Amino acid sequence: MAAFLEVNNLVKSFGSNTVVKGVNFAFDKGEFISLLGPSGCGKTTILRMIAGFENPTSGSIKVDGQDITGLKPNQRQLGMVFQAYALFPNLNVGDNIGFGLKIAGMPADERRARVDEMLKLIGLPGFEKRYPYEMSGGQQQRVALARAIAPRPRMLLLDEPLSALDAKIRVSLREEIRAIQLDLGITTVFVTHDQEEALSISDRIVVMNAGNIDQLGAPHEIYNKPATRFVATFVGHLNTIEATVLDAAAKTVSIDGQTATVPALPTTANNGSAVSLTLRPEVLAVGAREGSDITLTGTIADVTFLGSVIRLRVQLGQNVVSLDTFNDQRTAPPARGEPVTISLASKDLLVL
Amino acid sequence: MTDTASQPTQRRRIPWDALAIAPFVIFAVMFLVLPTISLIGGAFTDRAGNFTFENIGGLFTPQILNAYWISIRVSGASAILGALIGLAITLAIIRGKLPAPLRSAVMTFSGVASNFAGVPLAFAFIASLGRIGLVTIILRDVFGLDLYRAGFSLFSFWGLTLTYLYFQIPLMMLTIAPAIDGLKKEWNEAAQMLGASQWQFWRYVGLPILWPSVLGTLSLLFANAFGAIATAWALTGSNLNIVTVLLYNQIRGDALQNPGLGAALALGMIVITSLANIIYLFVAQRAERWMK
Amino acid sequence: MKTNKFWPWLIFILGAAYFIIPLLATFIFSLRMRRDALSFDAYVSVFSDPKFFATFGYSLVVGVFTIIVGVLVVVPAVYFVRLRMPWLKPIMEFTTLLPLMIPALVLVYGYIRLYGSSSLIPFTGSVLGTDILLTCAYVMLALPYMYRAVDNGMRTIDIGTLTEAAQIAGANQVQIIGQIILPNILVAILSGAFLTFAIVIGEFTIASLLARPAFGPYLVGIGTNRAYEPAALAIISFVITWGAMGMINVLGRFAPRTSARNT
């Protein structure tokens, strides 16, 4: 089966500044794709090129086998949700949702039925006579979503739709968007700078860095096997531990006087040279844990109580690492300055 | 508890507040409210000081009605044309993606031109489009187009309207520019994504959003032209029978031979500008139901 | 998706032509006083007329007093209404819009009827009284602009917080207005002042009806008697207006900027 959304060698330059440097990807129908990266990485420019608001300097975009690169935005049959809602303030909710249908020439009674159906879908039945200013940000963004999907577009584009909302609503709306997307089976491209958002909602994630794709994969692949140091630091939290190479061929290193065998070493590593090992907070444990083969002792430098989780920062020689422990209501949380023993499995060490 | 505790300070504050706004209130009463009341009173008082409707009735002569009618037409035409042309130019500059430096230059010029009214403006148009004005002469000698033989006169209805547009258009541009800036780029993009053409965007979204601002400015432009006299006076002298010129002559020399009639004339002007505003408020209220 | 810039440019060029041609024509016209060549004779003639300086000077002085009185009337009122009596704000906005709606001609007619030499407050009974009345009439004429300039200035600096901060620091009411509020809205006041100046300097109707020797009536007199001097005066007036507006633009760069400005 051919890909539904196909982007080939996409390049975009503004003057001498190239913000998208030859991007390729292909996705299947019904996938939820996130473009993830810091601001300025080119993710929004890619979305705007798919939408038709920017012309690619070179390269092509295909949707469902059709090359849409030269089409005007209003010929592409795509739906889009903007960061700041962008509801038409002079139209009520019903007319906003029905706008695309009206443009397409749908008769008024069919339109009304579709608007009702959309309002039910987003959980705001009976809101059609309200004006945008009479609603909260979360409600407005749901209406914007309904407006985008009402004409049954071939694809849905979401341009940081959650970043203007409060934290609580952000999470609930994100789940709602995903549920609606799965329900309709609509191919969706979601732009965000929030890694947690991307990990929780996507089928696949494109991690962008400075105009290039650093990694493309399912959320667990991106998190567990980051392809580059950038991906590892941008997605999730990362600890760094300095170690010395003992035997480059045998992949053994010395951490704090203990010998560990790591999954891989850089090709440049020589016996006796320093190497930075990285690891996720959750592979570290306080005390001994099954499967752990390295034990380190240090002092607790900082304790952050986060509710169900307690985040500790532990001083290990010249390294500081973070790790999370579950909050146990029966015992007091660790205190700053206490000595602590932590353990980890050497197979979880990443060398980037 | 808190009420009783805060009351003494409240009481001490009141004289301060009253004192600070007193000049404003006295000014408004002395130079806005009382003169208006005096004119309204005068319009309904005869020479002996008795109540009468005669002055109002006296307005309904061909000369005075004609003066009102010409004034309304000049003000209406210059307001509507000024609003449309001003809107078109502002849209062209802001939304037409013309170079940014052009915009600030045009807006600065608008600030100047909207205040370049009165006598000097009349002089400029006489020097350009008067009988021996430079533009008139160049059109006649170079292009063979004799404006005055073709029926144009600077001292006519259209001449005055053309002159008024010189301050009406910039005034429109200055007042409407913030509203056009308030049109979010995303609204246009959202409309495009939903399949709308540029024309459909303006038809259903852009212009309806601007409409209340356009209407408000329209009533302002109307009042602005309706009360104007210096330009007309310097341009046409007493040639063009507009209501301000009539009233001006009445104030200077009792041209109507009846001060009560003068007051009635002034009252009529207030009624007409108020009416323009009431129409605006009525239409705007319907157009603005989507606003906070 | 190339945007077509043909229409925007066409509209802009037509508009620019309408605004620039009369200025250009007037300027060239003003240079044609001498039969055989272009010259600045019309300007020489204007500047050698002592009445030009006398009337301009008179209007200048009246303009300065108008600005002073306008500031004294508007600033305290806007400040206290914003701070203590926000419920008065709509009334105040309406009041300051009235001079735009009631023609100046009508108002001055009212003044003449109300404050004539035989009335309770006979402003027009003496020369000084008439000058004062003229100044007050100009304050009224400029009120909408002065009010808006000052109100914008105060909105920008968030006077509520500034006042509370000054009160906590122990300042009294006079110190707050004089040392905190005024310096911060100075740019706004000056903008209003230059706008007032631009309105007042060539004003004709009120000055002529009150029979004061102002610049506006002088212009009309020249217009009826001369051919080329009016064109020169139009150019001079345009330059003066441009100067006043230019000052506002320059001042705008010194205006305090806060987040409130964006709302």
Image: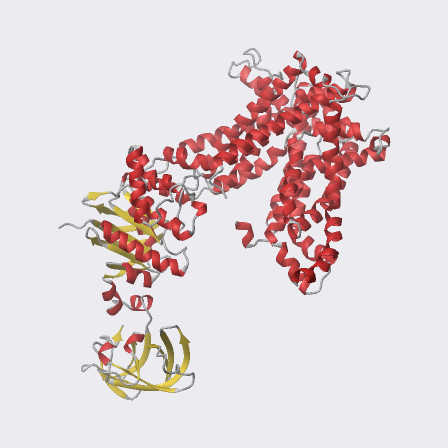
Image point 67% across, 25% down: which residue? B229
Q: Is residue A125 left or right of residue B68?
A: left
Identify the residue at image location x=25%, y=78%. A269
Quarter where residue B175 is shown: top right
Give the residue at x 34% y 42%. Answer: A97
Please, which residue is most extreme toward the top here?
Answer: B149
> In the rendered view, would you say B53 is above or below A101?
above
In front of the other: C227 or A338? A338
Q: Give the mark count.
A: 0
Residue A296 is at least partly visible in this image = yes
Residue A324: where, in percent of width, then height? 34, 76
Query: With C138 as the anchor, is B194 left or right in this view?
Result: left
Q: Is residue C135 above or below residue B239?
A: below
| Location of the C terminus of chain A (image quadrant) | bottom left
Residue C44 appears anywhere in the view: no
Q: Residue furthest left?
A: A1
Query: Where is residue B187 drawn, in percent x and y?
Result: 40, 42
Across and down, in percent, residue B236 comes to 66, 18
Question: In which quadrant of the rendered view does residue A169 lie?
Answer: bottom left
